[in-house]
Structure formats: structure tokens, C-alpha cells
Amino acid sequence: MNPDDPRARRTRARLKAAVLDLAARQELGSITMSALAQHAEVNRATIYLHYPDVDALVTDAMEDAVTAVARAAALCPLDAPRDRPPVPLAELFDHVAANATLYERMLGGQGSARFAARMRERLTEELTGRFATGSRPAGFEDVPADVHAAFLAGALIGVITHWVCGGRRDAAAAQSFWRLFRPPVPG
């Protein structure tokens, strides 16, 4: 099968839409390949031509969202004032809030470890790239940039997971994360 074939791309698009629709309505662990095939109106064998399992499919289906989250995090001006989260960070949390059920299903206890790992990898890549251009908070020169990026990626995913899975979907999440990221200057 040629993945660039227009028919293959259309089939993958249908499968991605179907898995996201099902994931918005039920836990990931309860989505079967048979139900997915029925919902996407394809043969079950067709799914296996494109994806080995539901986890791989849902991770691929969320790739655009993961990229958007990673880019938003990397666009935050690191010198923004502590009292107000930067616009890209606020937009990132708005995006997660608008898709909270899906993120809860993806990051919760019955979620996708593959998705969480992919999100962490993309965030780490984006932040490492940003740090390589000299846009890195001061005071961390004794820590390798990729380790610093991995730390921040893990922290952000942890806050997002706590926020969507812990029922705290309040508007202050971006502000809370930003305050943790930009601690007060001792004075």
C-alpha cells in the first residue's frame, strides 16, 4: 500500500475522524476495531492495513493537536510578566479546555501511553529547539538544554493531566502554570 495514494489518505482521514468521535464518547480502552470499522464505514481488515491497533490510530489522529500544543508552549515569551500568562500559553489551555473530554480520555488512567509519550517528545523537541536559539530562561546554564526542556514538557503535561482529569477545569490553570514556570524573584 502506498501511503501517499489519495485513497489511502482518505481512508486514514476517515479512520482518524472516527476514532476521535468515538473517543469523545467513550473510554479508549472500550473502543474495538470492529466498532471503529463500523463507525468509519470500512472493513476491519482495512484498519489493520493502516494501523496495528487503536492506540496507534488515536495517537496519529491527535498529531495535529500535539503539534499545536508543542508550538504554543515553545512560543511563550519567557520574559513575560509573572502576573499574566503569555497569550500562547493561554491559548494552549483554551485549546485543551475546548477538547477537555478528549484530553481526559487520552491522558487519564485508561488513556494512551503512546499519546502521552508523543506529546512529551514533541514538547521536548520544540522547547529544545527554542533553547538552542538562545531563548531560554536565565539561571539554568548548568543544566543541559534538552534536560531542561524535558523537565518543562513533563511539568506541562502533568499540569494539563491534573487539570483535565482532576475536575479543576478553571480558568486559572494557565496562570498557575506560568507562576510555577516564572517563580518570584527573591527580594
Image (spheres, helix red, strand yellow):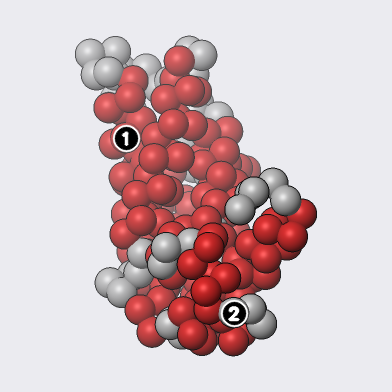
* Real-space Cα separation, disc 2 to disc 1, in angstroms: 40 Å
Toward which corner of the image does residue 38 lie, by quadrant? Answer: bottom right
Name of the residue lying farthest toward the left: 142
> Residue 124, image x and y in percent?
39, 35
Position above or below: 55 against 22: above
Q: Nearer the viewer, residue 55 or 136?
A: 55
> Residue 109, image x and y in percent?
28, 72
Residue under label 2 = 43
> Residue 74, image x and y in percent?
52, 33
Let me know if residue 21 appears in the view.
no
Q: Earlier in the sequence, mark 2 or mark 1?
A: 2
Amino acid bearing label 2: Asn
Q: Nearer the viewer, residue 21 or 90?
A: 21
Q: Residues within 10 Å of mark 1 (few under 14, many from 20)?
A: some
> Residue 35, image x and y in percent?
51, 86
* Identity of the residue drawn at 44% across and 39% down: 123
Q: Is residue 60 left or right of residue 137?
A: right
Toward which corner of the image does residue 161 lie, by quadrant? Answer: bottom left
> Which of the two marks, 2 or 1, is nearer to us in this view?
2
* Identity of the residue drawn at 66% across and 82% down: 41
Residue under label 1 = 150
